[in-house]
């Protein structure tokens, strides 16, 4: 209740100040372990960081399911209906059911796929993504494909990107990206922004934003504690950008 009543009106005003109606907003969904709590969040990417929009504490350990993902995304879609939205998700959010649902909401999406996901190109048999011959530094965009055998999805494309390997910077696996963007460049540009939510989590857990007075909060005030913390985070982020 606190997130809905207190945070959403606040973040709506912040976004109005920073973004113009109709502007493209990149929203990352992610889950992290926050002390003993399973924190599930959607955040808007800005300046290589992220600002939380809505979050929930999952009453379980491990990955989220489709119903929980929809429940997280809905408030953000309602709040930001004046903008062009792009949903970004890592391999936890690879399901074609989520992609189908996002299509009905008329938003863009880039969802990273697991390497053992099955793909069927026109005129070919199903094969796993990691069976495709991909080398470092190569990009590919597969259109008119069907993803997943048992729950086939043919309303998107698969973008494949494996960053060129350098001694200091090695990407262990290619990105397999399920997207409804019309080209690979937009899909890669969008997915690269997803790291902003990871940077935000790291800042809040280990950076200067991890104030002692916010390090411990009881279950009844979990959301209030996070609201306090994120208000502080936004203030410090704004100062550092300016």
Image (spheres, helix red, strand yellow):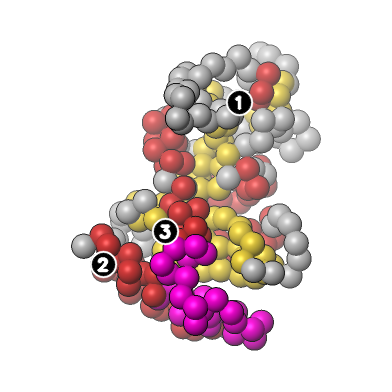
Q: CA distance from mark 1 to mark 3?
A: 32 Å
Tell me the residue at 55%/48% (across/down): 89
Q: Determine whether, in the image, residue 241 is placed left or right of residue 153.
A: left
- Sequence-wise, the earlier of marks 1 and 3 is 3
Q: Position of residue 95 (x, y in %)?
A: 67, 44
**The C terminus, quarter of image:** bottom left
> Residue most toward the left?
242
Residue 186: name its quadrant: top left
Whole-number angstrom distance, CA of label 2 to CA of label 1: 46 Å
Do residues under tags 1 and 3 come within 8 Å of each other at their CB atoms?
A: no
Question: Element at badge 2?
Answer: helix
Spatial distance from mark 2 to mark 3, Cα to Cα?
Answer: 15 Å
Q: Quadrant of the N terminus?
A: bottom right
Image: magenta residue range: 204-231
Name the secondary structure under disc 3: strand
Judging by the rendered image, the residue that carries numbered circle 3 is 50
Label 1, on which residue?
Answer: 145
Is residue 217 shown above or below 117? below
Q: Residue furthest bottom?
A: 220
What number is the disc on residue 239? 2
- Residue 183 appears in which quarter of the rendering? top left
Q: Position of residue 37 (x, y in %)?
A: 67, 69
Q: Is residue 165 visible?
A: yes
Task: Confirm whether the magenta stretch covers residue 127.
Answer: no
Q: Where is residue 234 drawn, in percent x and y?
A: 36, 69
């Amino acid at each position: 209740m606190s997130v809905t009543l207190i945070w959403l009106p606040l973040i709506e005003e912040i976004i109005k100040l920073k973004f113009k109606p109709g502007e493209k907003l990149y929203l990352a969904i992610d889950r992290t372990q926050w002390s003993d709590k399973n924190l599930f969040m959607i955040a808007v990417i800005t300046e290589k960081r992220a600002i939380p929009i809505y979050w929930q504490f999952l009453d379980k350990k491990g990955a989220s399911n489709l119903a929980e993902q929809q429940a997280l995304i809905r408030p953000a879609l309602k709040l930001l209906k004046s903008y062009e939205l792009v949903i970004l998700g890592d391999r936890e959010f690879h399901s074609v059911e989520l992609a189908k649902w996002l299509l009905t909401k008329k938003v863009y999406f880039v969802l990273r796929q697991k390497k053992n996901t099955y793909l069927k190109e026109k005129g070919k048999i199903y094969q796993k993504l990691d069976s495709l011959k991909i080398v470092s530094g190569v990009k590919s965009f597969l259109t008119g494909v069907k993803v997943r055998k048992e729950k086939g999805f043919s309303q998107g494309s698969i973008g494949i990107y494996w960053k060129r390997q350098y001694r200091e910077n090695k990407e262990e696996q290619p990105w397999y990206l399920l997207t409804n963007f019309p080209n690979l460049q937009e899909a890669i540009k969008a997915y690269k922004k997803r790291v902003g939510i990871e940077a935000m989590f790291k800042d809040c857990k280990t950076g200067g934003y991890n104030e002692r007075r916010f390090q411990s909060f009881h279950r009844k005030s979990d959301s209030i504690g996070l609201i306090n913390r994120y208000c502080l985070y936004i203030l410090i982020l704004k100062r550092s950008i300016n």
